[in-house]
Amino acid sequence: MRNINRQIVLKQRPQGMPQASDFEMIEQPIPEPGEGEVVTKLMWLSIDPYMRGRISAAKSYARGVEPGEVMVGGGVGQVARSRHPNYRPGDLVESFSMGWQDYAKLPAMGLRKLDPAAHPPELALGLLGMPGLTAYFALLDIGQPKPGETVLVSAASGAVGQVVGQIAKIKGCRAVALAGSDDKLAWCRELGFDAAINYKTAGDLSAAIAAECPQVDIYFDNVGGAVHDAAMSRIGVGARIIICGVIDTYNRMEQPDIGPRHLRRMLVNRATMKGFLITDHIARFPQALAELESWRRAGKLKYRQDVTDGLENAPAALARVLSGGNFGKQLIRVAE
Amino acid sequence: MRNINRQIVLKQRPQGMPQASDFEMIEQPIPEPGEGEVVTKLMWLSIDPYMRGRISAAKSYARGVEPGEVMVGGGVGQVARSRHPNYRPGDLVESFSMGWQDYAKLPAMGLRKLDPAAHPPELALGLLGMPGLTAYFALLDIGQPKPGETVLVSAASGAVGQVVGQIAKIKGCRAVALAGSDDKLAWCRELGFDAAINYKTAGDLSAAIAAECPQVDIYFDNVGGAVHDAAMSRIGVGARIIICGVIDTYNRMEQPDIGPRHLRRMLVNRATMKGFLITDHIARFPQALAELESWRRAGKLKYRQDVTDGLENAPAALARVLSGGNFGKQLIRVAE
């Protein structure tokens, strides 16, 4: 192989929606693994809303990317060189720390080895990875869905939302989707959602939610903003509200996010709202992945991916994800 | 006794702060008890912020008072007439359904008989009644305070807040008070709060909270509004936010309550917010009252009351409570 490692580095912190010009592609030599490390060749790069937070100046739960540094991201790669006995060239691995680059030097300890016979490897970035695990733990641990309850999901055709809806159905709930295009609504119905609402064209969104939900028992929120407010207007007694993402705010994190306070409604309904981060649940990943995989093999979990080719298109794909332009889990196919 | 029962009825729904002119005192004959009922003579009437919700047109967790009806309220009274074998004239009883009137006809089943030797009877409306029980269950069940954590309390010298702070100290926490006058701050320090902040004069309230709280682990919110927002700006990882009251909004419930959305902060800190209503916890009242009473006898729970004489002053006392003008649990002494 040619000794060139393409890397996309952050050039400057974006103002609002990230632009291609906020990033820069540079070329560096392919790194050499140290003792206990491997160098991987990137095949699939995951594009996720959380990335906007990493390039913002606002405080978050993880260290940000400074201008000049390689952009962070999870991916699936093939081991190119190894200095760890458990990994050999050709092995498929998934890592949260691949970065936007062709070759990554990684400690073997943090890798997940993938069985190419078990499932398409890129599912390790979606249904059988962070988004699927997020849906699993946030819905089951915080939501504690009971048969007959109504689960309302925002960004319902997205990487997390589509799994939430299908697990809600597995648990005997009524699942109602919120999404932003008729194609997405149709897909949600195909997945088994009982109803789907286009939040862009619904007009009075609160009324549209009331028409499909006797009451909102669980609101799985991936977006925040006005959609959140409409959902909150329909919560019932004992409702659980899962704050999993606030895409609506990701491009304006330096400005205050203003809207109705729902405190009185929280009190009257004795509702619970809880923020969720997947990293709190690492110890239980293996058992959750086993259950997700068993549901998938039983045909109970489908998964839609939105694939863009070429590492150089990662910045544009991030902008699409942040504007809801993607349809399903957004991936970049970097190499076959 | 003269056969006159003074009653305060709602004349019209208040616009904003309730006025004396929204109520009217009428005279009716004293009622006769039916089988299984007693008629009580009111001694102490409890004045509480929740009452504002009962005379609002906005939906709440309980049926409202219609114009022409006797205003609702809890109180302590003496049995005047009884048609139930367990109650005799002269017995002291507490009921949530006394109403703003000299004489109430009540089913004996819903009464709590008080032992005049055990404690001053009016404590059954405060420390050893709904406010104390609210502090107890909301702090311990939702808050789950751990030694060394910081508990921030709004309306800290109020009927509920003063008990919250003292239980927080019993549980080994740092307790920080928010109150609206220097007298109230001094009282909170006397109760054992580690620090007290005057939210009216603090200037940058968020900075003032940061100066006294390493991070807010538990925020016990009795008020909502801008004080809520300042507290939310200082929550730490794993914070619990207890929504117990929203006094700030009680006089403007027909208008939207607008402010910062704290969703991203909830997510980053995996915080939990939960609304609280005491009526969910009735089954455990006896054990909670026993523990509160044991702490009181051990000198660990003090309790300040703000006593106004005369049933006719109840409307003005309600306005005081809603504007924070009271200092401690607001009571009306109706008869000795």
Image (tube, coloured by chain):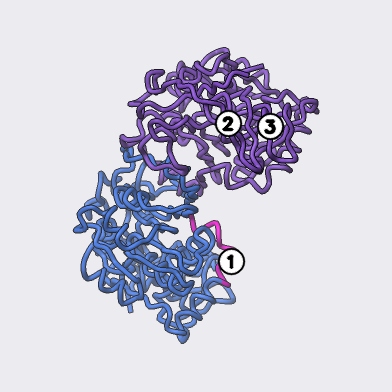
Chain colours: A blue, B purple
Horizontal side, residue B12 vs residue A33: left or right: left
Indicate the amino acid at tag 3. Val
User: Where does the magenta region start and end?
Assistant: A276-287
Q: Residues within 10 Å of mark 3 (few under 14, many from 20)?
A: many
Residue at 43 percent across and 73 percent down: it is A169
Question: Quick one: A46 or A80, which is closer to the camera?
Answer: A46
Judging by the rendered image, the residue that carries numbered circle 2 is B104
User: What is the C-alpha distance between the residues marked 2 and 3?
Assistant: 12 Å
User: Circle 1 is placed at which residue position?
Assistant: A284
Amino acid type shown at disc 2: Ala
The residue depicted at 27 percent of the width and 54 percent of the height is A207
Q: Is residue A241 above or below residue A35?
A: above
Structural distance between the alpha carbons of marks 1 and 2? 58 Å
Residue B93's tag is 3
Considering depth in this image, is B118 or A50 the residue closer to the camera?
B118
The residue shown at (38%, 50%) is A54
Q: Three-letter amino acid code at disc 1? A: Arg
Q: Position of residue A250 (x, y in %)?
A: 32, 49
Image side of residue B278 versus residue B50, left or right: right
- Chain letter, disc 3 residue: B
Q: Is residue A26 visible?
A: no
